[in-house]
Amino acid sequence: MKPLKLRTKLTLIYAAVFTLLLAGVSALFYQLLEYQLDKALAQELSERANALRGYLRFEGNQPRFVYDTSDPDEASFVTTATRYFQIYDTASGALIARSPEMEAMRFQYTPEEVRELIRAPEQSGIQTDQANLLVNNDVVRAANGRSYLVQIGVSLSPRDTALSHLFRISLWLVPAGTLLALLLGWWMAKRVLRPVEALSAAARDIGISELHRRLPVRGAGDELDRLAIAFNEVLERLEKAVAQMKDFTASISHELRTPLTALRGEAEIALAHAGAESECRRVLESQLEEFEKLSRMINQMLTLARAEAGQIELARETANLSALARSLVEQMEPVASTKDISLTARSGADVIVTGDTSWLERAVLNLIDNAIKFTPDGGVVEVRVRTQGSEAILEVIDNGIGISPQAMPRVFDRFYRGDPSRSSEIEGAGLGLSLVEWIVREHRGRVGVESRPGQGSIFRITLPLAPHKSEPVI
Ligand code: ADP
């Protein structure tokens, strides 16, 4: 299963906690209300039973509630309080009177149950299909010398209705609260994670050539600030290490140049004195060729190291890409013709960019040189220059050996050379395209490649066009 996003996790946790809390509070509130209602009802019932006892008279064995019918308060109290009552003879356990409502409930204790109630006359419950009552049990001794079990009841239905209302409200309230918590949680998680998103976007923007950049520290002094500071410290260490490596490459290339020049000089002198057909001459000629390759490679390494150390200052002049392509094609024509390769330049109107002509020349020359190197005899290489929107595009197209999909992402890496079986015969240190990439990047452009093995490659440089002189600047 795919791991959940942090935002989803935070939202779910928040909603779960909120739901639990809401359900817990609802349950507690329900219990509290139930307890309070029961307590109030029990108290009211026992007060009512006490008061009623004052109105109860026995005539013979017949009970009667005697009160002043002209007093509305008294009349109302006695009528309400006697709505549910029944009276049993304690000696026989027989029912001797009950209210019409009680009658309608058709509920009656057996003499056994009456005896049980007399032994512990507390409040109890009566539940039938018609009503649910709380009853007060009292043993009363009458003037006639007999004793009776007087049972006064109240209906529990208002209490039950209040509780079921609350229960139904909770049934709506908890899911509605959960929904609200989900929405609120989603919004809050977004707010909380916004600085994290900003940090990761900033970190993603820092490439190996931008190690001088730092992540923004908001100054809130929180965990995110500490993370940014720690990341910045790593960047600082990385920047130092990379700078040291660049320095090392630059100085090693520089140091190698002097002995190499001496070796080459000595080989040239020895060659001048070697016999025309001697074995020694053959060896010296081959050595000179190797020295040549080595010194080209060292020069390239030095240039790259200097470029990346920021020691190369590029001019910002007007550069005509079309003219540049034509002149380079002319310059490389003799090399192409040794392999019987047709090398042409195609361009419409002049395409002008801002930059350093000689460095741009170097980049395009590298691409043309590669195209000729990796195209078999009799092939075709074309340099096309055009504009697209506000950009200038220069393409070097060949119908050579092409690049395998596995090699594609690596061709711009330093020291990367295609698979040795293909290029062992072809000289090169794998630094040319790294330099091309650096030059293009310095011109705020990009370089890319499309290729099909066996069919050829297209290397494409895209640069911003120079601002048009004749256009008024607003
Ligand atoms: P090199 O000095 O080896 O030419 P580059 O950096 O210029 O180094 O090129 C790296 C690798 O990219 C080459 O070794 C080759 O495999 C591949 N490559 C570059 N240009 C082409 C091309 N036009 N056609 C086919 N492969 C190419």
Image (cartoon, grey):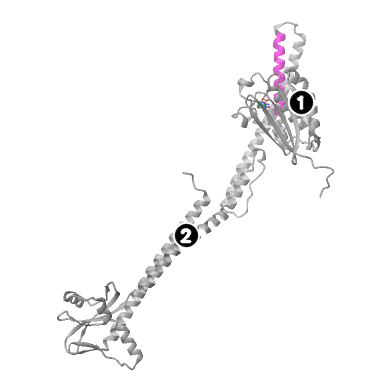
Q: Which of 99 and 310 is in front in this view?
A: 99
Point out the residue furthest to the front here.
Answer: 104
Q: Residue 392 in the image: state x and y as whole percent.
A: 75, 37
Label 1, ligand 1: CB separation under 8 Å? no
- Alpha carbon distance from label 2 to label 1: 71 Å
Residue 449 painted magenta: no
Q: In this view, does 341 lie to the left or right of 183?
A: right
Counting other residues with Cα less than 10 Å from the Cα at mark 1, is it few (<14), some (14-19), or many (20 or more)? some
Among the 4 quarters of the image, the one containing residue 162: bottom left
Point out the residue furthest to the left here.
Answer: 92
Q: Residue 111 in the image: state x and y as whole percent.
A: 16, 76
Q: Residue 148 in the image: state x and y as whole percent.
A: 20, 83
| Sequence-earlier tag: 2 or 1 | 2
Q: Vertical placement of 168 versus 350: above or below? A: below
Seen at 52% across and 58% down, the residue is 183
Q: Vertical placement of 262 versus 3: above or below? A: above
State whether the magenta stretch is mostly helix, strand or loop: helix
Point out the residue furthest to the bottom here.
Answer: 70
The residue mark sitting in front, 2 or 1, is 1
CB-based contact (under 8 Å), mark 2 and mark 1: no
Q: Disc number at residue 178?
A: 2
Q: Tell me the SS state at disc 2.
A: helix
Q: Disc number at residue 344?
A: 1
Residue 283 painted magenta: yes
